[in-house]
Image (spheres, rainbow, N blue to C red):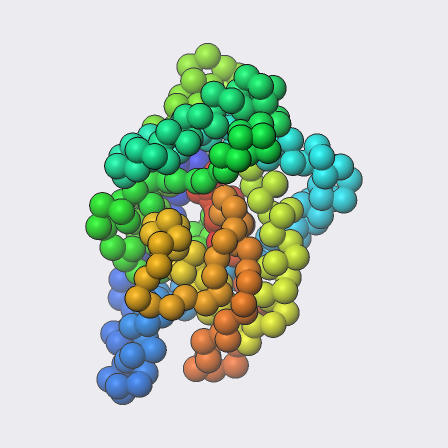
Amino acid sequence: MQERLKRSLMGAALAAMVLTSGCAGPPTDPDARAAYEEANDPWEPFNRYIFDVNYAMDQLFFRPIAGMYRTGVPEVVRDAIRNFLRNLRSPLILIHDLLQGELDRAGQTLQRFALNSTLGVAGFIDFADEVMGVTFHDEDFGQTLGVWGFQEGWYIMLPFYGPSNPRDTVGLVVDSFIDPVSIAMQLYGPEYGPLARSVLTALDQRSRAIDALDEVERTSIDYYATIRSLYRQRRDDEIRQGRPTATPFAPTITGEEQSPMFQTPKPAEAPAAPPPSPLFIKKGGVGADQISQRAQ
């Protein structure tokens, strides 16, 4: 199942590149050319189509299930599940902390994993944060590539997974192969472990992003363009690890995992034509652990 998912993801990205390779060139008007380059989305018609399909699936399946999960499962249980999933991700985060040369953050990740795996009852209690004040941070191979200087490339909308780019798509695939917990599950079982983990992660992230995404959709002139902007800003912030930049970013993304938490709303990019139906963001996901979030 995991291998099929990996091949499907890679195939989707390659198909998007092939199908859109013949897209029209940039506009000649200076103002239109500047907006075109700022959006970094030369495959926009195809991306909007995929976004539309993702949104329809989200409204039909994912959002109702996530809503039932949020309503029917007590918050204390949902928080325990999130803590457990975060703890399972700690070995992968540690790898990327080290690859990025962030020794202090690597020490924090190692400390969190040791404390939460023992005193935190296998990670269901975030003992490291609640008692020791060692907060969670996330890392992935897309972020590591960004730290190493790889550019994001053109904006891509992946089926099911949502907003991405070539750098982050490669990161999703690489993480699926090098995640120590997934490798251990594949070697020692249960076989359904990686899939169950991905489904639980997507469910948790989508349930926590319901209100934020509904608000963004309600206030956006062009939901697709707003999500595109938010995704790119969030990824830039994650790569910089919150460090200041000469370019101001709004809204500030301070969210957890891949689920965006929005502060000051930013006006959407003005569409060249009447905006299409609102589209769905992943969250990030990815997760990727990244089923339609969430952008993801």
Question: At 47% across and 61% down in the image, what residue appears?
Answer: 252
Name the residue at the left extreme: 149
Residue at image coords 72%, 39%: 75
Farthest front residue in view: 132
Query: Would you say 198 lies left or right of 21 here?
Result: right
Picture layout, residue 98 above or below residue 42: above
- Kindly identify the residue that appears in the image at 54 percent across and 69 percent down: 265
Residue 92 screen position, x and y as percent: 39, 30
Quadrant of residue 174 within the rendered picture: top left
* Res 84 seen here: no
Q: Position of residue 3 (x, y in %)?
A: 40, 30
Residue farthest to the top, as pictured: 188
Residue at horizontal 52%, vertical 51%? 255
Taking depth in this image into account, of 272 and 208 the one nearest to the observer is: 208
Side of 79 relative to 149 (left or right)? right
Percent from the top left, x then y, of residue 140?
A: 37, 40
Which of 109/219 is in front?
A: 109
Measured from the top left, where is residue 254 in percent x and y?
A: 50, 53
Q: How many marks?
A: 0
Residue 22 seen from this side: yes
